Amino acid sequence: MSDSNIYYQLEKLRARFDGIAVESIEQELECAQFESLQIDGIVFQSSAWLDQVGDEKLLIFQLQQSGLFISKSYCIGIKYSDNLGAVHLTNKQLWEMGIP
């Protein structure tokens, strides 16, 4: 399994929300359909949610592989702040914040 294929799919999910104002994200999430994706023969469940850390809002995109003995998550996100606007976040940056 190639991590690059997983992150490619996460980037496609995130691209659907690029350019949408943070005020409209919750409504967009309600309308969005997140489905199972098969990547390199492995099934992942896709999801997204809005979170808050301090004064900043985070839009998190996740692909999760769940099995009997293994559960593995991959995430990327968008951070919305008054100072910088919308900034893309990596899996590592989200883990440093404690997400997921």
Image (spheres, rainbow, N blue to C red):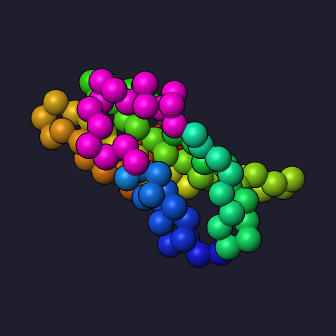
Confirm whether residue 62 shows in the render: yes
Check if residue 17 falls in the magenta segment. yes
Q: Find the residue positioned furthest to the left.
A: 83
- Residue at the image point whose x is 55% and y is 55% from the top: 74
Q: Quadrant of residue 27?
A: top left
Above or below, 100 against 76 in this view is above
What residue is drawn where x is 29% and y is 37%? 20
Q: Position of residue 46 (x, y in %)?
A: 60, 48
Front one among 41 and 94: 41
User: Horizontal and vertical percent for residue 85?
Assistant: 18, 38
Tally of numbered tags: 0
- Quarter occupied by the C terminus: top right
Locate residue 50: give its quadrant.
top left
Of residue 67 and residue 9, the one placed in the foreground of this image is 9
Q: Is residue 31 left or right of residue 36?
A: left
Query: Does the magenta run of residues contain 21?
Result: yes
Q: Quadrant of the N terminus?
A: bottom right
Q: From the viewer's perspective, is residue 51 above or below residue 44?
A: above
Indicate whether 4 appears above or below 54: below
Q: Which residues are magenta?
A: 16-32
Q: Residue at x 68, y 51 (%)?
A: 36
Residue 90 percent across, percent down from the top left: 39, 55
Q: Residue at x 45, y 41 (%)?
A: 60
Q: Is residue 53 at all visible to an observer of this figure?
A: no
Left or right: residue 41 compared with residue 88:
right
Left or right: 67 in relation to 9 = right
